[in-house]
Structure formats: C-alpha cells, structure tokens
Image (tube, helix red, strand yellow):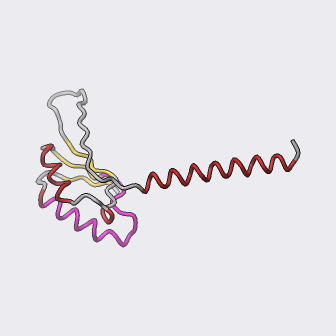
Amino acid sequence: MDIYGWIRLILIAFCICAALFMMACMLMMRRAKRLTVVRRTYPGRGKKCTFVQLSDLHIAKMPVSWRNIAETVLEERPEFVVLTGDLCNKIEETGRVADFIAAFVSRVPVPLYITL
C-alpha cells in the first residue's frame, strides 16, 4: 500500500472514531425521565442494611422534582442516603445544589452522605 492508501485508511478510521464519539456524547446527554429503583440483597453478617444511592442528578437540569425523589426515597425506608457525583455541571450551579440538599434533608429524615 502506498502513502496515499495509508492516509485514506487513517482518515476513514478517524471518521469512524469521530462518529462513535458523537454517538456516545448524544447518549450521555439524554436525561432521565423517571426514577429507577433497583433493589439488591447482599449477603452479609448480621442485620440487613437498606440505603439509597442517588447518582448523576445534574440538579440544574433535573426533569424529576426533588419532591418526587424524596417520596421515592421515603418509600424505600433507608437507613441512609448517598448522593454520588455529578450533582452539577458548572460551578455557577452550586447554589441550586445547596437548595436541593436543604430541601431534601428537610423532607427525608435520614443521614445524607455526599461525594463530589
């Protein structure tokens, strides 16, 4: 294969990678329209522990109200709640995150642990 064949092959590979990257970005930008509750039982020692993990809320663009989230969490009767990552996309949204957390803890009377 001559140099032009290699260049053509590299350009085709680049276009395929760019298309796959764009598709992955579009999938990541889709927002959840509902809350999904997953129940799992883990073998352990002693009593059963129930907790709720809320992840990737992106609070500024959240299509589900905090009240709906709080009601769903209360139905599960957890011992604690963990908020894990992606609470906001920009530093300017931290005020909305603080408002969400304040409203959430006023409604859900269990310990709340947060990771950033």
- Image quarter of the C terminus: bottom left
Q: Relative to the observer, which residue lies in front, 108 or 21?
A: 21
Identify the residue at the far right of this view: 2
Residue 78 on image: x %, y %: 15, 44
68 relative position to 23: left or right: left
56 relative position to 106: left or right: right
Was residue 15 drawn as part of the magenta stretch in this picture?
no
Q: Which residue is drawn at the image coordinates 13% and 54% (left, top)?
A: 108
Residue 35 on image: x %, y %: 26, 49
79 relative position to 96: left or right: left
Q: Relative to the observer, which residue lies in front, 50 or 44?
A: 50
Q: Which residue is drawn at the image coordinates 40% and 68% (left, top)?
A: 90
* Image height of 97 relative to 115, above or below: below
What is the count of numbered marks?
0
Numbered range of the magenta stretch: 84-106
Q: Relative to the observer, which residue lies in front, 68 or 56?
A: 68
Q: Residue 63 falls in which quadrant of the image?
A: bottom left
Q: Relative to the observer, which residue lies in front, 12 or 103?
A: 12
Specify the principal SS of the magenta part: helix
Q: Which residue is drawn at the image coordinates 36% and 55% (left, top)?
A: 31
Residue 68 on image: x %, y %: 18, 55
* Image height of 57 relative to 9, above or below: below
Q: Which residue is drawn at the image coordinates 48% and 55% (left, top)?
A: 26
Residue 64 on image: x %, y %: 25, 58
